[in-house]
Each structure stands twice: as C-alpha cells, then as structure tokens.
Amino acid sequence: MPYSWILFDADNTLLDFTSASKKAFAQAVTKLKIPNRPNLFSRYKKANHLVWTAFENGQIDAITLRKKRFELFLEDIEVDRDPVLFNQLYLDNLVEHSELLPGARQLLDHLHGKIKLGLITNGLKEVQRPRLTHTRTDHYFDVIVVSDEIGLAKPDAAYFDYVFKEMGLPPKKKVLIVGDNLHSDIKGGVNYGVDTCWYNPDGQPNESGITPTHHAQNFDQMLEIINGCKAV
C-alpha cells in the first residue's frame, strides 16, 4: 500500500448522514408539533448549511452553531419554538438513526489491521462518538478527532496539526484523506500537503476549483486507490 494512514471523514463518507438527518428532523418536528409545511427539511438544510459554513470558516463557535441553525429555520417558517430544545431533540434522534453507508463496514473490515485508520469529523461532541458506538465502528480507528472536542475544525491547518500529533507525526506523503466534502475534507488536505480522495457517489461535477488527488464514486474504487492499484 502506498499509504500507511487513511483518515476518513464520517458523515456521508462512512455514515449515512442524509438518511439519519431526515429521520431525526422529522421526529423533532413531530415532537414540537410544528405545522406541516412544504419543503420543511429543505428549508432546514439551507439554514444548516449557512451556519456550518460560518463555523468551518471560523466565524462562529460550536455553541452558537447548535442554536443558530434552528433559530434561522424557525424564523424562515415563522414558527415560535425553542431552538435549543429543537437542537437537543434532533441530536438525540440522530444517534438513534445512525447507520453506515452500504459497503462501509466491509471496507473497514478489509482495511482494519492492515493499515492505520483515523476518523476526522467536524461533528458535535454529544453525537459523534455515540454514533460510532451505536454503529459499532469505534474499534476500527487508531485515532478519532472530533472538532467540537478540540475547538478546531476542518479545513483549518491547526485542526490537521492536532490530528497529525495524535498520529505520531507520520510523513504527509504516507497519509490519505478521504471525504465527501470538497471544502472541509479536500481543501483542508490539499492546503496541508496531504493526498486526498474525494468520495463522490452521485458523480457531482467539481466546480469548486479544488483539485483532489483521487476521485472515487464507490468503495471498490476507493479500495483500489488505497491499495495503489489505480488513480481515479
């Protein structure tokens, strides 16, 4: 293998965040008795994206993030509910509905014990480790770094400084970052001088100006890249 370490993103790289998020949001909406409106989840995703982008750019902290995304959503739909409670219900449900993407466990089983594995995630501390426990995946990883636990987030170079210290400072050329997010995962890796693999199962066009080292649309292609058989 050309790499001695693989650093995986969590959400929508290994964990099916899209499915869990929809279910968690729907349960919270029902619990809070929010009137049914068209495109509720889409409107929440828009607010959530704005807030997470601000967080990853260092413009707000994680405490603000938790509340702000639901404040924006509730303002948008003109409904008066407690955004802090909304956030708590959503996060609790998110753990309950967490599942791996199809094929992710087989990939981890194949790599485990053959190569060092790390998990690097911008998730919140009250859900990320519990979700790994819920999906029985925490044992695969030699290093787990949750942004909310250290006060740093991808793509900040300081986040990767912390990760590499946890790894024992391996040569950057022996590390591969795998993730679905061009901004946090791929840009973070590129700027840090580490090879990257953009996991893009839907074949979305890359119009970001960010160039990953590799591009994989499925776990078979990803494994070929890790094994050094083929660059996609």
Image: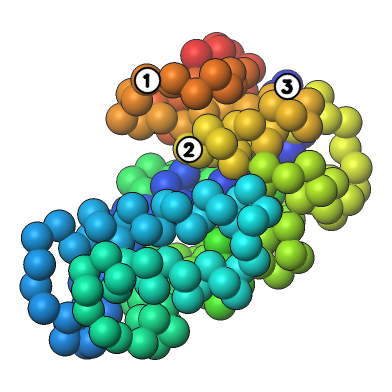
Per the model, the C-alpha gap separating discs 2 and 1 is 13 Å
Front residue of 1 and 30: 30
Front residue of 74 and 189: 74
Per the model, the C-alpha gap separating discs 2 and 3 is 21 Å
Q: Amino acid at mark 3?
A: Pro
Q: Amino acid at mark 1?
A: Pro
The residue that label 2 is drawn on is 180
The residue that label 3 is drawn on is 2
Residue 28 position within the rendered picture, expressed as x and y whole percent measured from the top left: 27, 79
In the rendered image, the vertical position of residue 221 relative to residue 106, given as above or below: above
Disc 1 or 3, which lies upstream in sequence? Answer: 3
Disc 2 or 1, which lies upstream in sequence? Answer: 2
Residue 17 position within the rendered picture, expressed as x and y whole percent measured from the top left: 38, 56
Label 2 neighbour load within 10 Å: few <14, some 14-19, many 20+: many
At horizontal 63% and vertical 48% (from top left) the residue drawn is 57
Eye-nearest disc, 1 or 3: 1
In screen coordinates, is 23 left or right of 36?
right
Asked which secondary structure carries label 1, the reply is loop
In the rendered image, the vertical position of residue 199 relative to residue 15, given as above or below: above
Quarter holding the N terminus is top right
Asked which secondary structure carries label 3, the reply is loop
Per the model, the C-alpha gap separating discs 1 and 3 is 27 Å
Eye-nearest disc, 2 or 3: 2
Q: Is any part of residue 209 visible from this angle?
A: yes
In screen coordinates, is 206 left or right of 172?
left
The residue that label 1 is drawn on is 205
At horizontal 22% and vertical 87% (from top left) the residue drawn is 31
Label 1 neighbour load within 10 Å: few <14, some 14-19, many 20+: few
In the rendered image, the vertical position of residue 70 relative to residue 123, given as above or below: below
